[in-house]
Image (cartoon, helix red, strand yellow):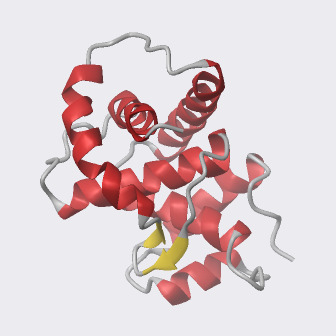
């Protein structure tokens, strides 16, 4: 997949969920790109990125190469109602945006922290081995600054979406 094509999808998702106000030169913007890329891969479709766990959750070294392209494309996609990403990516984009819009409605908005919790909890439920029996407490152990109530709320959302298993 071409870098620009994937960057275009990520930029459009960022715009569509209302995170396009993050300063593209900031560290926060890099976090947004990383979390959207991970969620796209986990909810939309496999776009060939590899992620590992870092202090702020899922991180892909490959996505470092996309920051500038996403930043340049973001203002261009802001006012576009629809973009043809190609057959495969259109479906990925639509699934991811639908999922994120449901999430935004469920938690009452989206910001950097709520996006980080969502992506991190998905990773704890699916990509950390061994898979923890209590994903909420595992995430709270890894990220002590988070509130248990919010992490539990996100966990319930992910259970409803069949992304995380019920607690044992």
Quadrant in which the C terminus is drawn:
bottom right
In the image, taking residue 11 as reference, residue 135 lies left or right, namely: right
Q: For residue 7, what is the image quadrant? A: top left
- Residue 55 appears at what percent x and percent y? 41, 81
Does the rendering let one see residue 119?
Answer: yes
Which residue appears at 36% of the width and 37% of the height? Answer: 14
**Up-down relation of residue 138 to residue 82 (above or below):** below
Relative depth, front residue between 36 and 50 = 50
Q: For residue 88, what is the image quadrant? A: top right
**Up-down relation of residue 164 to residue 3 (above or below):** below
Which residue appears at 42% of the width and 33% of the height? Answer: 13
**Up-down relation of residue 121 to residue 168 (above or below):** above
In the image, taking residue 66 as reference, residue 2 lies left or right, namely: right
| Residue furthest front in the image | 2
Quadrant in which the N terminus is drawn:
top right
Does the rendering let one see residue 112?
Answer: no
| Residue furthest right in the image | 168
Which residue appears at 40% of the width and 57% of the height? Answer: 63
Which residue appears at 48% of the width and 50% of the height? Answer: 37
**Total numbered badges shown on the rendered structure:** 0
Relative depth, front residue between 146 and 94 = 94
- Residue 49 appears at what percent x and percent y? 56, 56
- Residue 121 appears at what percent x and percent y? 59, 67
């Amino acid at each position: 997949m071409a870098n620009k094509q994937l960057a275009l999808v990520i930029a459009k998702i960022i715009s569509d969920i209302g995170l396009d106000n993050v300063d593209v030169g900031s560290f926060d913007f890099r976090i947004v790109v990383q979390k959207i890329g991970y969620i796209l891969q986990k909810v939309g479709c496999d776009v060939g990125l590899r992620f590992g766990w870092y202090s702020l959750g899922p991180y892909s070294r490959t996505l470092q190469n996309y920051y500038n392209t996403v930043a340049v494309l973001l203002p261009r996609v802001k006012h576009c109602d629809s973009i043809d990403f190609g057959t495969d990516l259109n479906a990925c984009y639509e699934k991811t945006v639908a999922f994120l819009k449901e999430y935004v409605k469920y938690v009452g908005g989206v910001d950097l922290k709520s996006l980080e919790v969502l992506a991190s909890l998905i990773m704890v439920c699916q990509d950390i081995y061994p898979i923890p029996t209590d994903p909420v407490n595992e995430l709270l152990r890894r990220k002590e600054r988070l509130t248990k109530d919010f992490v539990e709320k996100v966990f319930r959302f992910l259970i409803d979406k069949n992304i995380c298993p019920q607690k044992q």
